[in-house]
Amino acid sequence: MLTGPALSRFRKKLLEWFSEFQRDLPWRHSKDPYRIWLSEIMLQQTRVVAAIPYYELFLEHFPDVKTLALAPKEQVLRLWAGLGYYSRARNLQKAARQIVKDHDSRFPEARESALALSGIGPYTAAAILSIAYGQKLAVLDGNVARVIARLNAKRGDLRAGSRWQKLQKIADGLLAPNAPGDWNQAMMELGATVCTPRSPRCLLCPVAEFCQARKLGLTDVIPEKRVKRATEKITLAALVMVDPWGRTLLLPPPKSGANPLATHDVPALLSRMWHFPTIHVHGDAVQELREFVKGTIFTGQDFRSRLQPLPKVRHAVTYRQITLLPFRLGIAKLPRVPHAKVLPLADLSDVPVSNLTRKTARAATP
Ligand code: SF4
């Protein structure tokens, strides 16, 4: 662990490098805690290039915490659609409402109050509070942990046992007390652009002289690869009804009683958003789909022979590999289903839908 003059030189080198080489990202133009918070939430599990258009679109519609708090939930989810991990959007709005109600519409400065907000953990709290308010809190995410592990030649799974806490202690010790926000961003930037998971660019690294892993030739083995969770394969079948006007029927997100056709685990796989009637398939997809809708969507009709199989839709969410079998059913009149919505198949933008539902609609659109 660095101390004394070596630590001062390390901080100086990294901060100078950051000041010269940092990427020009939209959220770096502001110290507004709302904007920083929004960017931090969007960047969880999402690459910077993918997050930027969503960030800008969100700010156009919700320029401050109050507009976000007052917006209909459906609108928030619609603008988030495509970014994935929708619980982030739900928590974001929940937290916005907490901030308006309990903190006079301003992101709280106290760490404990920040941690009490929905969707805010130690990393996000440290990032927002250091960047927006200059608080001396060091961030530790995957990028920063990798940099610290390599600098100190710490081997093993970084998240195992008490290793994460030890890395946090080292991160706390490295933090530049006069510029905590820039410091945190510099560490993250180094991990994202130079000290990358594979093939770190050590020749361009501003702190290479301090790096133990480089000295010992261990940059390729630190950090140790995590044991991946086994892949779970799931097959779904969806019914895409289309009337002569090109309209289809979508079921609502599961809310108590609002969707009588929701089958246990399926809504979670569809990100708890609007979706086609969908089932989890264990054998004959057509037979199971038919049984599912018989007596609920349709009474007494046998539409089996009119089901047109469409190209499979494949989708991956974390460790799950989903294969969705869509079936198109041309129909003179869409059935009446409580709480369902009738929309043009070619444009589902009126309601929030998951990527999987969007892909299914594309497969069914001639
Ligand atoms: Fe990472 Fe290489 Fe810099 Fe060490 S020298 S911190 S491994 S980029």
Image (cartoon, grey):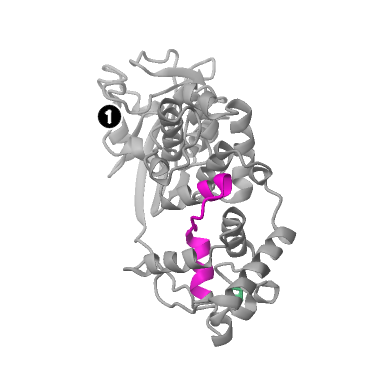
Residue 366 lies in the magenta-colored region: no
Residue 137 lies in the magenta-colored region: yes
Residue depicted at x 68% and y 61%: 18
Name the kind of residue labelled 1 in the image: Phe
Give ligand 1's quarter of the image: bottom right
- Classify mark 1: residues with Cα within 10 Å, few (<14), some (14-19) or many (20+): some
Residue 219: x %, y % from top left: 55, 78
Residue depicted at x 52% and y 46%: 128
Residue 6: x %, y % from top left: 60, 77
Residue 216 visible in the current orientation: yes
Residue where numbered disc 1 is placed: 292
* Image quarter of residue 274: top left
Residue 88 drawn above or below residue 228: above
Decide if residue 239 is on the left or right side of residue 358: left
Residue 331: x %, y % from top left: 44, 18
Decide if residue 262 is on the left or right side of residue 145: left
Residue 230: x %, y % from top left: 34, 61
Residue extent of the magenta highlight:
129-150
* Quadrant occupied by the C terminus: top right
